[in-house]
Image (spheres, rainbow, N blue to C red):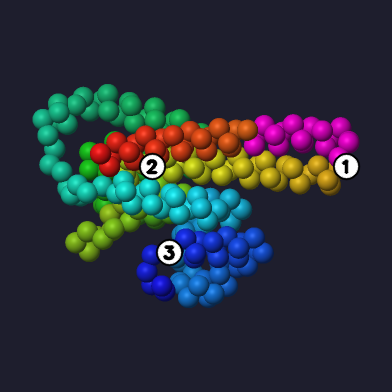
Amino acid sequence: MPGGHLTYEDRRKIAEGLAVRLSYAEIARRLGRPRSTIGREIARNGGPYGYRAARAQQATEWRARRRPSSPLHTPPDAEAAARDPRAVREFEQKLISIISGGWPPMAARVLVCLLTSDTGSLTVADLIERLQVSPASISKAVGSLEQLGLVKRERDNRRERYLIDDDVWYRAWLVGTRSMALWSDTIREGVDVLGAESPASVRLKTASRFFELLSNDMAQAAEHYRRTFSGSRDT
C-alpha cells in the first residue's frame, strides 16, 4: 500500500518501468509512492540498469532478518580500552588505502570509521571529530555510501546517526555482481553492432562471456553466504 513497505509486486512494476525507460518520477506516480522512495530502492539494488525485482526482494528480506537488535550505544569494555591506538590507526589507514582504490577517499574514510567502531554507528559530530573534516564532506561521503546501501540513517535524540551492520559486505558484493552482469549485457550488444563474425565482435563475445561467468560465480557466492549466515542467525 502507498506509504508502507514496498512489496514484490511493487518491485516488479519498478523493474518493468525501468525496462521501458520510465523516469523515476513516473514510476513513483504509477505506484503512488514518493520519488525519493523509488530512487533509494533502485540505488540500493543495482541501479537503473542492474535492478531485478526478485533480487531486490530477496536482499530486502535478508536485511530484515539480519537487522541488529542491540542498542545503539554500547559502553567501552576492557578489551577496547586495552587496544593500542597506534596499531588501530595503522590498520585503519591500511584499510582506507585498499577501499579507496574503487571509491572516493572520503567515503572510504567514513566507511572505515563505522567498520572499526564497536557500536557500528556514529553521528556527524563523531565523524567530524575523528576525521577532522567539514560537515559537508561527511554528508557527501555518506550520500555515496547510502546510495550503495552500505550505510543507513536514523534519528537519535534529534541528531542524525549513521549505521552499518554485519551484512555490509554482502550488499557491496551484490552491487559488484550486478555491475558484472551489466558489463556482460552491454558488451554483448556490440556483437550485432559490429557484425557477428568480425574480429572485434569475436573479441566482444569473449569479454561478454567472461563477465557473465564472473557475475554468475559472484551470485552463487552471495547466495551461499546468505544461506549460511542467515541460517546460523535464525537458529
N-terminal of the two: label 1 or label 3?
3
Residue under the point 65% across and 42% down:
183
Q: Nearer the viewer, mark 1 or mark 3?
A: 3
Q: Which residues are magenta?
A: 196-212
Q: Residues within 10 Å of mark 2 (few under 14, many from 20)?
A: some
| Residue under label 3 | 6
In the image, is 88 to the left or to the right of 221? left
In the image, is 193 to the left or to the right of 133? right
| Residue under label 2 | 168
Q: Nearer the viewer, mark 2 or mark 3?
A: 3
Q: Amino acid at mark 3?
A: Leu
Assign a secondary structure to mark 1.
Answer: loop
Snapshot quadrant of residue 225: top left
Q: Amino acid at mark 1?
A: Gly
Snapshot quadrant of residue 160: bottom left
Question: Do we see residue 136 in this rendering?
Answer: yes
Assign a secondary structure to mark 3.
Answer: loop
Residue 117 lies, in percent from the top left, at 26, 39
Q: Does the magenta segment cover residue 205?
A: yes
Q: Residues within 10 Å of mark 1 (few under 14, many from 20)?
A: few
Relative to 173, residue 134 above or below: below
Residue 155 lies, in percent from the top left, at 26, 60
